[in-house]
Image (cartoon, helix red, strand yellow):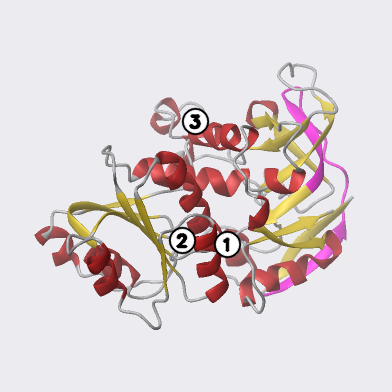
Amino acid sequence: MKAAFVTDLKKVEIRDIPVPEITETQVLIKTHTAGVCGSDLHLFLGTHPFRKAPAILGHEITGEIVKVGAKVTNVKVGDRVTVEPQLGCGECHFCEEGAENLCLKKQVPGTPNWIGTFAEFFPAPASKVYKLSDSVSYEVGTLIEPLAVAVHAMHRVDIGTRGRTLLILGSGTVGLLALAVAKVQGYSTIICTDTAPYNREMALKFGAAYALDPLKEDVVARVKDITGGKGVDVSLVCAGAPNIIDQASSCTRKQGVVGLVAMITKNIPVYTYGFVFNEQKLIGSMTYAPKYFAEAVELVNNGLDLKDYVTQQFPLDNAQEALACLAEKKENVIKVIVKP
């Protein structure tokens, strides 16, 4: 089968490798779509904290089951599915607490023990496979994994009151999906920022009350004006500008919450006094707990409309072009999908 390997800095090769064998508790999926994620870019650009070339890209997937292990009972051959792409050890404190995303021994695609999804076939534990509703296209199903990141993040920052106000800093894929989740959760006013006009346009289309350009507007002043000088209840950082955490803190009310979902791999300055003086919480959000992946599946299967989030599609042979499309952003882009 064909698979796309990152072999060096900004270099992708299509290689022919054997179709994976599966165990008695696994399934084999014929890949229909694989999403390009920001973490794939980290590998492509040589900045990923633990994935190193050569490695097969990808962890977002939809497809059709073509083979099941002897002990698999929850799915069958022919089922249309997606996969929660993480498998914890099942024995540590984090796994016992339902925080499999924090397991120190978890397995994820694109590592030596589990190939990535940029391949014609993909093996997965049956316990991590979820059926897609017949009404959900493979393309939209690909968005379930990044939607789960947004669902988890929005639960992490939830302050538990009605009429909440939210600022989303960075309206890329995860930022816009967080917007979709926030709409479902009933936030009264949602403000988005992004430097790209298209992303701001999409934020307004998907339900933001305001979409601000941080290059041309004083975001802090505008947010304070919108909220009557108070600041938002919650800010969610979905981009990696050097001043972005300070900006989020300055936009957030006293005893408010700043959530950090962006994978910022460079050291950036943070003015901690603002958090102390205003008694704010700074909360990190790492992928998703399994229950939030299941919630993302339920949202999509129940009709959450995400079709306009898919902006580009490439054949597997053009995987390098797909990575470059997201990395360089020379055209309007939210979610890029690869199709074997």
Place of residue 57 in the rendered image (x, y in percent of width and height, measured from the top left): 70, 57
Residue plotted at (48% across, 58% down):
175
Determine contact: label 3, label 1, CB under 8 Å: no
Q: What element carries label 3?
A: helix
Gap in Å between the C-alphas at discs 1 and 2?
9 Å
Gap in Å between the C-alphas at discs 3 and 2?
22 Å
Place of residue 123 in the rendered image (x, y in percent of width and height, measured from the top left): 76, 37
Q: Which amino acid does label 3 sit on?
A: Lys
Residue plotted at (66% across, 56% down):
308
Q: What element carries label 2?
A: loop
Question: Which residue is farthest left?
Answer: 277
Left or right: 94 as drawn, with respect to 249: right
Determine contact: label 1, label 2, CB under 8 Å: yes
Residue 50 lies in the magenta stretch: no
Place of residue 300 in the rendered image (x, y in percent of width and height, measured from the top left): 62, 38
Name the residue carrying label 2: 263
Q: Give the range drawn in magenta.
A: 10-32
| Of marks 3 and 2, the one in the foreground | 3
Q: In this view, does 317 lie above or below 164?
A: below
Q: Which amino acid does label 1 sit on?
A: Gly
Q: Is residue 104 visible?
A: no
Name the residue carrying label 1: 38
Q: Name which of mark 3 and mark 2 comes first in the sequence.
A: 2
Gap in Å between the C-alphas at discs 3 and 1?
23 Å
Name the residue carrying label 3: 291
Place of residue 33 in the rendered image (x, y in percent of width and height, measured from the top left): 77, 49
